[in-house]
Image (cartoon, coloured by chain):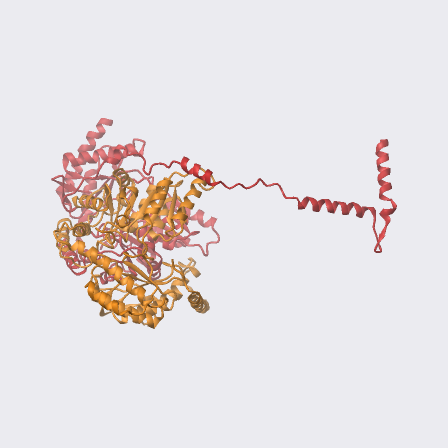
Chain colours: A red, B orange
Amino acid sequence: MNSLKNASDWLTFAYDAPFARAVVFGVPIGGHLFVEGLLLVVILFLLSQKSYKPPKRPLTNKEIDELCDEWTPESLIPPITEEMEKEAPILESAARPHTIINGKEVVNFASANYLGLMGHEKLLESCTSALEKYGVGSCGPRGFYGTIDVHLDCEARIAKFLGTPDSILYSYGLSTMFSAIPAFCKKGDLVIVDEGVHWGIQNGLYLSRSTIVYFKHNNMESLKNTLEKVTQDNKRAKKLRRYIVVEAVYQNSGQLAPLDEIIRLKEKYRFRVFLDESNSFGVLGKSGRGLSEHYKVPIDKVDIVTAAMGHALASEGGFCTGSNRVVDHQRLSSSGYVFSASLPPYLASAAITAIDVIEANPKLLVKLRDNIKALCTGLSGIQGLEIASDMLSPIVFLVLKKSTGSLKSDLQLLQDIADQVLKEHSVFVVPSRRSTLDKCNLPVGIRLFVSAAHTESDLQKAYESLKSVAASVFTGQN
Amino acid sequence: MITIPYLTALTTYFSYGLLFAFGQLRDFFRKFIDWWKASNLQGYAPICLGLEDFYIRRLYLRIQDCFGRPISSPPDAWFDVVERVSNDNNKTLKRTTKVSRCLNLGSYNYLGFAAADEYCTPRVTETLQRYSASTCSTRVEGGSTALHVELEQVVADFVGKPAAMVTGMGYVTNSAILPVLVRHGGLIISDSLNHNSIVNGARGSGATIRVFQHNTPSHLERVLREQIAEGQPRTHRPWKKIIVVVEGIYSMEGELCKLPEIVSICKKYKAYVYLDEAHSIGAVGKTGRGVCELLGVDTADVDIMMGTFTKSFGSCGGYIAGSKELIQYLKYTCPAHLYATSISPPAAQQIISAIKVILGEDGSSRGAQKLAQIRENSNYFRSELQKMGFEVLGDNDSPVMPIMLYNPAKIPAFSRECLKQNVAVVTVAFPATPLLLARARICISAAHSREDMVKALEVISRVGDMVGIKYFPAEPKKPELEEGRKKSE
């Protein structure tokens, strides 16, 4: 207490000391100014000290050498397992409804030759004359003398057939979707897509870097809820481009997309629709114009329609059609169109002839529909499998009633069934395949591609043999 | 390397600046006019926003007639170019029925298989009758015919690898193979001037991508050392695998890749080499086997070899060649094999027949003749152009020759003037090349005869003088040149 009093006395003394009251330049300097000055000096000193940073030590060359020596990469491919060694059956003639495998004639349900136009004499004629006139390849991309007049004719013919202003040809079916989508969907755009779409669409969406939202496979309730939620979340939707991507007939399940419902939803929420008509062009609708004709929706309500020509048209390549703006934009921004060689001219002329044949013979479509119905009725009641596809879909999809639990064993079981059917009954069917890159989770199954060229006896053979093999395989299990 | 003279750089920037300014002015007026008219979008966002297609609308449309010219005959040495007219200032072009016969310096027809060939075409027609135009199925379903198996064997033998896999389109080959080989956690180091298909494939794979300076093995080594030492971004875990992607001949530069150095560096650092021989297979090398043969690299050192059949074989499609296990694995997982229609049988037959001709197995020496012809043609053409004072890129022996134009106004001038004199050339500008470095690209073919090339040289020289692209001083014409040419004939 005393020392404190002493200290405070001392402080007061120092404070009131005479030098503290010196007058410099007419400004009275009080003792407090001295303390403040000292404080300022201390602050400046601390600021001028460098803050503590651990010294940067880049790796020396020797250390990098050591790291490089230590590093061992994985092998380029994982070890080969048994199922990888299996090879596909090799055909020895054209993939028509009756084809030759291993010297034996089999009934072919594995080619997507829906209207039986493969080997049609008009197509072969036009191909031969195109081959003799133009050679095989077109030797250049479309921008650099790879545009042959048959390409322009083909585009005009497709546009005329569908009733759209213009169309654009791609040189490969798979690349159509994965080049068209990144041309329109950029980073920041919003895309609502069905979860069962095929790999081409998935890859295109991944490359486009847009925001992707999936909805349950072919479930319109789920689509409506997703649209509702997404519109609520994104109020600043003026500059945002929004798309819905669906397939007309899904390759992975054979379901049909209900287009009228989708168009109604799209108009309500202001989205644009991307429709992939690979398996419905030339199949659905009274004259084969696809899903829009089937649902009696005018084609200009669907913004972008793409299709691969390797199915009903018995040719190769793909096309995309829509309004003039849509098509012209793709001519410069679609990478699979600009940076790749154009379609060989004989395939383009085959496509033109195929469309002519379809237009002249609408009864092919009726025959196809009857065949599908006959096959489905024949397959009803099969043991262990059930038909998962729509009654109008040209792909008849049989899934396991009870899955074995893992994708691999499902595929193995289906492969066994297919092999047995081929060996014992000479009917060629195939199980669906899944690549490791595919994100689709739909169940796998056996696919039968029905063609208008299949006869009654072919169909009968198919369903009878499948029924007997399924019975033998599944009674073992039950 | 391209060194652009300062004055040219300045004038090019000025030209682009002027075009940009005019474009903006027109856009401004367009916005003004559209404000009066009601928009018919009704709440949808426009499909192309503002500046995304500015280049297309304001710059490309002015010179649209230089691109996409339709032809009405096979793309052989001489072909028919269809004339087009425009009524609305180049916005839309309509075909006319007039054609003009022009010399083809633009198509990728290196060995002259573009038109109907005496050995190949009868076999192709026969295959068409037997297997029809398409198989309508994927390879794992009904699309593998005996022809496809033969094709893969022939291609593997030709390229020098144990096995090969063929797909229907070259672009898809790259885009579908890279994602299968490398996933997230891997590293792809690619040359800065690689083709769009490789860039797309690399992006689609999810791996990290690093770029090294074009054709500079020392920079590649630096990048490799840095990346292996650092590891994956942010986690610094070691990379799962590293793939270095290079091309055999770069199509916009005409240069050959420095393969021996790159292969030795990759061996040292245990990276895998992926070689894209789209332009070089069939066109270079003593027996046409590509860059590996030309530069003396053992094919066992290159892990994955990829190529296309569009250029030298006159067909379509792409291939991947590698070890047996690699091909087996790819056939099991690659989407191009599982989901895409198999290659069309007539196209497959064309490839088999073309390879037979190149190897001389058809009983004639046409293959060897074609290979010698294209080498001679390319070297002659390149040296003549350089003597005239043009700035020509590319190495000797490469059939691709870009001639530098630089200025955007020279692009349509060169193209249209040449067409008037019946020579069809290809001009390339942004975005396929950097903005300042527009060029005209010449592709020589084995089908070009000496007279064709002399005529082409004459026309190009005349147009070059008119347009002003002789950036280097021309060598004075020596009298021995005439005698030298006579001696070689």
The residue nearer to you, when weighing B471 against B60, is B471
- Could you say where residue B79 lies in the image, as x and y percent from the top left? 21, 65
Residue B80 seen in the current view = no
Residue A306 seen in the current view = yes
Residue farthest front in this picture: B480
Which residue does the image show at 83% across and 48% down from the upper left?
A30
Residue A148 to residue B170: above or below:
below
The residue nearer to you, when weighing B465 against B429, is B465
The residue nearer to you, when weighing B280 against A163, is B280
- Across the whole image, how many numbered discs are drawn on residues? 0
- Could you say where residue B26 lies in the image, as x and y percent from the top left? 43, 69
Position of the C terminus of chain A, as image quadrant, is top left
Q: From the viewer's perspective, tell me whether residue A48 is left or right of residue B201.
A: right
Q: From the viewer's perspective, tell me whether residue A207 is left or right of residue B149.
A: right
- Could you say where residue A475 lies in the image, as x and y percent from the top left? 22, 28
Name the image quarter holding residue B163.
top left
Residue B130 to residue A150: above or below:
above
The residue nearer to you, when weighing A223 against A78, is A78
- Could you say where residue A251 lies in the image, as x and y percent from the top left? 28, 45
Position of the N terminus of chain A, as image quadrant, is top right
Q: From the viewer's perspective, tell me whether residue A27 is left or right of residue A297.
A: right
Name the image quarter holding residue B160.
top left
